[in-house]
Image: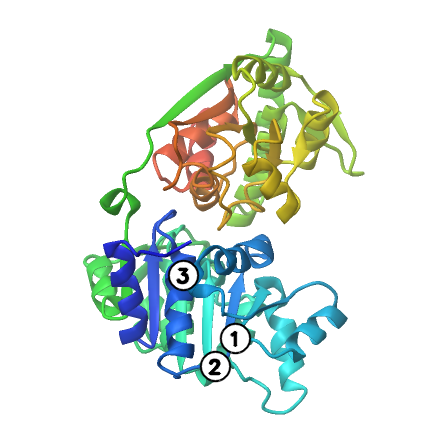
Amino acid sequence: MKFIPHKYQSMAIEKIYNTPRCGLFLDMGLGKTVITLTAIEDLIYNQFEISKVLVIAPLRVAEDTWSRECEKWDHLKDLSVVKILGSPRKRRLALAQEADVYIINRENVVWLTNELSSVGDGWFFDMVVIDELSSFKSPKAQRFRALRKYITRSKRVVGLTGTPAPNGLIDLWSQMYLIDSGESLGKTVSGYRERYFTPNQRNQTTIFNYKLKENSEKAIMDKISDICVSMKAEDWLDMPERIDSIISVKMTPEQQLAYEKFEHDSYIEFAEGEVNATTAATLTNKLLQYSNGAMYMENGSYVVANNQKLDALSELLDTANGKPILCFYSFRHDLERIKERFKFAKKLESSADIESWNNGEIPLLLAHPAGAGHGLNLQAGGNIIVWYGLTWSLELYQQANARLYRQGQQNAVIIHHLITEGTCDERVLNSLQGKANVQEDLLKSLKAKYEK
């Protein structure tokens, strides 16, 4: 297929040419992969500036998306691609091959740096592309610490993401450090926090989160504006119509009373300890499990509380009139119960599943938002999404919806949310739609409910 770039794509390609270390904060559906590969192809074969490129991506994107884009476009077919995936032996064999582009999943970044350091100065990549840069938002993560030691040896770096600050601008420092080694936002995360933020929630020894100082947002944006470009899909694309639907699921009075007791007891349990981001997420997950109709026990088994969401999904399948449905689940017991109820359901696991879905061969495709949240092009296979269980991550929620709601979708996208009335489902949905901090919002609502 011949690639004729849109205006915004040409602008992004020029940004890569003119800014050796840059961030492309491009919304979902704008074509980050083909933009970057086009620049790579030109830098290798026409400008002779680089020869070896490392692409770091989420696992499923590393397995499928980058190589598929090379096969799709005529001008990229000369690019040789090697995937550093699988067992350590397979990774070593791949690393030893001659290629233009080497693709590795982000979980193996630490392994890669250790592997190359064991053979002396083995870092041979003169360009690094970090697909979904926001996955390096934690300066404490091993993958960040490992990569920061070596990425300065590459003369070109491109950071790609549609959501650079899913939890606020506090997340930007480590991402920008990988791009420019601290030139824009400072050499240390502590200095970044001191300049632009003040402590928000804290106890005597621990700060749980931060809030921006006055005028800090503009100051941060000014600091990174020369090396980053941000584009929103609605500003550049003719997006399909999006229809959000709320499907109310009602428990019986007895089931509702049991949920209310469980919610109360769970909140009191957490409130007695130190409530922070980790415990808030754990509490949210416990309540969302119950809202979905089942609960894990300490031994790893689960008990079923109700089947109302399964019934609601069955009704949606009936009214879809044979149209395929992409269903996002939250917990393993969701997956198991859905597959037990609907024998034709298929879990998204491989590139073959993506191809089958896009060919219209899977009536009910089951995916976890963390596994299908980035980079997968599924819009050819259907236009109906069902959220069987909600995620508390705004980033995953937006990215998952963008698997169908994106450029190239030929039909209006219908996004159904199965919401169990009177449960945590309602609060999480409101928070997601309001773009608030979901865990913090949940805790506030529970505090108001149970501490009167």
Q: Quadrant of residue 23?
A: bottom left
Q: Residue at x 46, y 38 (%)?
A: 379
Q: Element at badge 1?
A: loop
Q: Residue at x 62, y 72 (%)?
A: 110
Above or below 280: residue 14: below
The Cα atoms of the two marked residues, 3 and 2, are separated by 20 Å
Amino acid type of the residue tagged 1 in the rendering: Asp
Q: Are marks 2 and 1 in contact (CB under 8 Å)?
A: yes
Along the line of sight, the residue nearer the viewer: 235 or 10? 10
The Cα atoms of the two marked residues, 2 and 1, are separated by 6 Å
Percent position of residue 392, x then y:
49, 39
Q: Residue at x 25, y 56 (%)?
A: 8
Percent position of residue 30, x then y:
35, 50
Whichever of callouts 3 and 1 sits on the residue coming sooner in the sequence is 1
**According to the image, label 2 marks what residue?**
51
Q: Element at badge 3?
A: strand
Percent position of residue 357, x then y:
58, 36
**According to the image, label 1 marks what residue?**
100
Q: Quadrant of residue 11?
A: bottom left
**According to the image, label 3 marks what residue?**
160
